[in-house]
Amino acid sequence: MKTMYIKIFIILMFATGLLQWSIFDIKWEYFVTIQAIHIIGSVVVSIFLIIPFVNKHTYKYLVIERINSKSGWLLGFTLLLSTISGFYLFLVGNRGGDILGIYSFNIHLYGSFFLIFFFLYHVKKQNTSPNMPVIIFASILSTLYPTVSYSDVGKLTLMKLENNVSKYHNEEWTNSVKCKTCHSDIFDQWADSNHKNLVASNPYYMVMEGIAAEVEGEEFRKWCMGCHNPSALTTGLEKTGHAMEGNFLANELFEKGAKTLVDELKTYGNSRLEEGVSCVACHRITEAKSKGNGSYTLDLTNRKKYVFEDSKSNLTQWLSEKFINSKPNVHKKSYSNPLYKKSSYCASCHDETSPTTGTKIVSTFKEWEKSSFNNPNDPKEHKTCIDCHMTYLKEGEFSPLKGRSTDGGKIKKDIKVHYFSGSNHFLSGLKSKEHENQILQLLRTSAELDVEIKNDQVHVGVKNVGAGHHLPTGVADFRELWLEITVKDRDSNIVFESGKLKDDGNLGEDARPFMKVFGDKDGKPVGLLFWKYEKLLSDTRIPAGKRRVESYNIQESEKLKYPLTAVVKLNFRIYPQWVTDAVKKMYPQLPDPPVVELEKIIKKFPKK
């Protein structure tokens, strides 16, 4: 009777262990139950049933009856390996980088197939089918060729992890607040930047990830998460989560200084996963390629850590910081890389290709690569991404900031600031006016205007003088850059105007925006579903160093009362009103992005 129970328990443990394998993709609510049955059942059955039985069985047949069975030896050895590796996984675990954990996982997984094979072979005389060993071996071979599907992460993001690590543990994503102790200024800059606030505190992203999942399936989220949420993706999370305050959703939209993240470290230590682009997410990239879609390699497990670096005790954490400070070169080397000064580093996420159509959605790096800014033979002319986007601005001029990147460290002439100034002044500005100011200063270095009235036409020239890529770039179908023109006669009567907003906040049909318009395979605008882009309907953006002229017809000269006064503005809005309206259905507390005046020119024209 006991032998029968052991057979049942071994097969049950094999089945519950096998079902936890990722290729079966068991729903989470079932997975946790199966996992509990497997772990608790294996421990209890091993200690109280299998180990005592094996001891008696071995003593009986080997010592008393002196039967030397090869299959029995193989079964016993395999059982021993499976038991030891199982207890190691239970007590220590496999976090993805621990070599013993990796070995234990593989021994336990593949050893279980051999265990079943030898077990069935050993007891084959007890009504076990002689074909069972063949079936078991066939199942082993089948696992070497897992089914390839479109939803494979490699199809949706080009991210790689070191040494074929498949997944990280939460705590390997060290909370960025730990960096604040020694890099307080850099942390404060990052905390309110758009790089930090790429997920839960960015309502536009949260809505778009949800729409992408609804339209293309849940797996499609991984395309978004590869750049916006690498920590979640690499720890096995299937979607971007919302920060919580107790049992309520946290509102991080107006939160300053990453308060939620700071509080979570105090409450949960390093066990609560930090989502978004953290310090570690950028500073443990070991390789980056200009292929977009997260074409970078992460390495979290090979970084050298000091004693107590992962400790949860305040005292030992303090000691760890002292150990780092006493000899910081190893720490510095772990989080710096010459790659970080190259534009290809940024290209890994700031170029973007649709995984459904294969078309280029964003080509910021490629635009820079073809521009005059990419001129390594002339250091005075050559400007990389960080030269513009991580250099401090003062009164509209690049003014390298003198200071310390490490508290108490040496003074540097040019601290690379972590405001990550780009175009999204709006969301950063809700948290920090300093961030908004830095971004607006950068935006206002981008273009120059000129205007002429000639032959009953207004001719407006816009030249891209400051951006090392197209103007605008990035998600150029969601960026609004346009001309607002008003021409008045000598009596201040308006004789021509264009580019005014309609009552609903959207651009009027007469506006001349500088933007991309994406179309689907049938040539219809894709709207929010930008990844469905197959045909480019229009592209009126301005390449680096180029000038575009827009011409408008006005009244015949004989009917005009000269002199005429032309007021021309180059306006910018980070999101169109129709996009914001869609997001506000889920986030009603979100204010409308303002229209920003980047350039303005006023010029009088006497009659010629």
Image: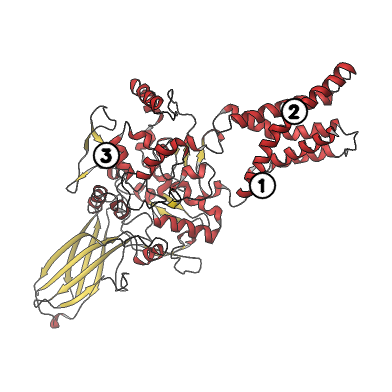
Marks 3,1: beta carbons within 8 A: no
Identify the residue position indicated by label 1 in the image: 24
Amino acid at circle 3: Asp
Q: Nearer the viewer, residue 102 or 34?
A: 34
Residue at 68 percent of width and 40 percent of height: 37
Give the image location of residue 189, x and y in percent. 29, 42
Q: Is residue 26 visible?
A: no
Nearer the camera: disc 1 or disc 2: 2
What SS does tag 3 mark? Answer: loop
Nearer the camera: disc 3 or disc 2: 2
Tell me how far mark 3 sits from mark 1, CA to CA.
56 Å
Identify the residue position indicated by label 3 in the image: 378
Amino acid at circle 2: Leu
On screen, residue 70 above or below 378 = above
Badge 2: residue crowd in 10 Å (few <14, some 14–19, many ≥20) = many
Q: Is residue 85 visible?
A: yes
Identify the residue position indicated by label 2 in the image: 79
Tell me how far mark 1 sits from mark 2, CA to CA.
24 Å
Badge 3: residue crowd in 10 Å (few <14, some 14–19, many ≥20) = few
Say which label, 3 or 1, has the lower sequence index.
1
Say which label, 3 or 2, has the lower sequence index.
2
